[in-house]
Image (cartoon, rainbow, N blue to C red):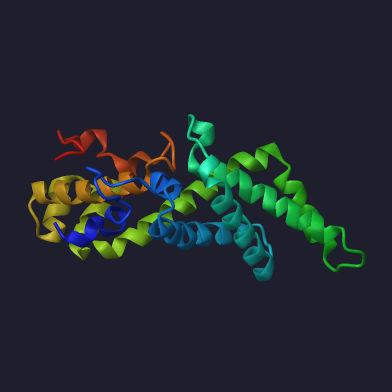
Amino acid sequence: MNSSETRDFSEYQSAGDDTPLSLVSALRRGSDRAWSQLAQIWGRTIYQFCKGRNLKHEDCEEVVQAVLVKMYRYIAQFERDGKAMRLRHWAFTIVRREIATHCERYLAKPGSPGGEDYQRILGEIHSDEDAEASATAFRNQLVNNILESIRPDFDPNVWQAFELFSVQEIDGPTVAKRLNMNANAVRQAAHRVRKRLRNELEGVLDAETPQGLLAVPESQAVEETLES
């Protein structure tokens, strides 16, 4: 196994720990590496979410900074307690509140141009129907960004095997033939990426994480554990 495959995750580890920390645990312990990872990946995700709301670049930047500051200040008080308190849900709630606050602050300024756009965004933020769709979009973008962040740590063939086998759900023998690998090597490659992804997502997402990313499709199930 390429040592870089677990590089980012293992850097969350504290002296004396038998296993690496999850991002959430590392954040609570004040890990600089964890905060850098959060700012990079989550900051990008928040920015993309704001752009999807048609906020201007400068507005997106302000919201990103405000959200990251609040996460930094209150992470010590953050407690995981079921679905509602997964890090992603907690962060998403902060994002929506900051967008609403930003729009309200803008609308409070007399004579500000483009007020109707901010009013529309504010209305969407306060919509329960919009909240559900937005939460799904935020989650999917976050997973995509996390995947992209760990991709350079894997050999290209390992990553391609993971994408074909676990994401596109192509059967092992077909993937093996396409990549000039044996079927067992394909399964092991996909397992290595999924294991790393599980580590990165510990305490971040809930059970609704797309199964194609974290588990072998049922039709291709193999007996393997996280410890293998």
Where residue 113 appears, as percent x and y from the top left, is 85, 69
Q: Is residue 59 left or right of residue 25?
A: right
Given residues 7 and 48, the one toward you in this image is: 7
| Number of numbered labels in the structure image | 0
- Residue 18, image x and y in percent? 22, 42
Looking at the image, which residue is at 9% across and 46% down? 184
Quadrant of the rendering where the C terminus is positioned: top left
Q: Residue furthest top?
A: 82
The answer to whether residue 38 shows anywhere in this view is yes
- Residue at point 24% right, 39% down? 216
Q: Is residue 175 above or below residue 60?
A: above
Residue 88: % across, % down = 50, 44
121 sits left or right of 204 in the view: right
Residue drawn at (39%, 49%) of the image:
26
- Outermost left residue: 182
For image coordinates 44% across by 41% down, the residue present is: 205
Relative vertical location of residue 184 with respect to residue 148 in this rendering, above or below: above
- Residue situated in front as seen by the camera: 130 or 80: 80
On the image, which quarter does residue 145 sit in?
bottom left
Hey, which residue is sitting farthest front in the picture?
Answer: 16
Residue 226: percent from left, percent from top: 21, 38
Q: Quadrant of residue 111?
A: bottom right
For the N terminus, the image quarter is: bottom left
Residue 96 horizontal side relative to residue 16, left or right: right
Residue 160 in view? no
